[in-house]
Image: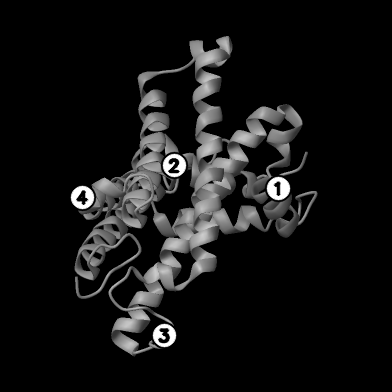
């Protein structure tokens, strides 16, 4: 391969997959905002007719409403990034949510960083003294490799807790639908295939399968982009976006 991206895939494959994902994600997000735009500014008031602009204007006015008991920054840090309200209800649920939340975010950030590095290297001639040619670019940044692996395990812990709760906690198990199983199982498959494709590429105990490392990486990347990014606006995972927005508009709090 002339140029290898994060998982050892060609740059062209990642460009095509990346742009397709972005189009699906933002298309779905605009669709959701249009639906939210049919809401009204308050009880008994007329709706906004599906206006995205109207929705965004209302959203910002509610987020920065001076009637809130705490500031936007406090709400962002304490109620969204630290998720204290979940912690106050259940420590186990908090560990599950916080590990999935930060595991997903950090893996996404690292992938985007390497993608930007590749763009700058390919079209700007940057990082020429840092990157080892003929190897996936991420290997030239050992700190990112290490952190990526750490947060991969962080995400795995959260997913395993989610699975265990649905298997062993009666109340959660009784409320579990096929949709929940599909989403949780899909996230588990993504995490596991990520580790497997990495082990194949690095030649650990799966060294005998190194020849199929690129197809394995492609499978992992495609389902990751579809499941963890493109499908967000169309599934229950929209709460990753909707819940923080709701917390911000209500001023968070304990």
Q: Badges 4 and 3: C-beta atoms under 8 Å apart?
A: no
- Considering every residue shown, the one lying at the far right of the view is 69
125, above or below 197, in the image: below
Relative image position of residue 136 (x, y in whole percent): 33, 68
Q: Secondary structure at mark 3?
A: loop
Crowding at label 4, few (<14), some or many (≥20) Cα neighbours within 10 Å? few
Residue topped by disc 3: 127
Residue nearest the viewer, comparing 233 with 151: 151
- Measure the alpha-carbon separation of dots 1 and 2: 20 Å
Q: Residue at x 56, y 29 (%)?
A: 161
Q: Nearer the viewer, mark 1 or mark 2?
A: 2
Res. 40 in view: no
Q: Quadrant of the C terminus?
A: top right
The tag earlier along the polypeptide, 3 or 2, is 3
Residue 238 image label: 2
Q: CA distance from mark 2 to mark 4?
A: 34 Å
x, y percentage for residue 105?
51, 53
Helix, strand or loop under label 2: helix
Q: Which residue is mark 4?
A: 212
Disc on res. 201: none
CA neighbours of label 2 inside 10 A, class few (<14), some (14 to 19), many (20+): some
Task: Where is residue 154? Give x, y as percent.
Answer: 56, 44
- Lower sequence index among marks 1 and 3: 3
Q: Which mark is residue 251?
A: 1
State the separation of the CA atoms marked 4 and 3: 29 Å
């Amino acid at each position: 391969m002339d140029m290898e991206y994060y998982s050892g895939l060609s740059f062209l494959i990642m460009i095509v997959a990346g742009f397709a994902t972005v189009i699906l994600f933002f298309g779905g997000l605009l669709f959701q905002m249009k639906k939210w735009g049919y809401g009204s500014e308050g009880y008994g008031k007329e709706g906004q007719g599906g206006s995205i602009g109207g929705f965004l204007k209302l959203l910002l006015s509610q987020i920065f409403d001076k009637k809130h008991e705490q500031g936007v920054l406090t709400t962002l840090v304490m109620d969204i990034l630290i998720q204290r309200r979940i912690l106050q209800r259940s420590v186990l649920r908090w560990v599950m949510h916080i590990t999935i939340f930060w595991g997903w975010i950090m893996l996404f950030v690292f992938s985007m960083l390497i993608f930007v590095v590749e763009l700058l290297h390919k079209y700007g001639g940057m990082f020429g003294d840092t990157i080892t040619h003929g190897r996936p670019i991420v290997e030239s940044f050992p700190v990112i490799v290490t952190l990526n692996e750490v947060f991969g395990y962080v995400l795995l812990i959260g997913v395993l807790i989610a699975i265990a709760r649905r298997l062993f906690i009666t109340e959660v198990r009784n409320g579990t639908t096929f949709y929940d199983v599909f989403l949780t199982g899909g996230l588990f498959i993504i995490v596991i295939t990520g580790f497997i494709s990495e082990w194949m590429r690095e030649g650990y105990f799966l060294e005998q399968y190194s020849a199929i490392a690129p197809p394995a990486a492609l499978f992992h990347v495609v389902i990751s982009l579809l499941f963890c990014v493109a499908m967000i606006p169309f599934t229950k995972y929209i709460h990753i976006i909707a819940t923080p927005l709701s917390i911000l508009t209500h001023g968070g709090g304990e």
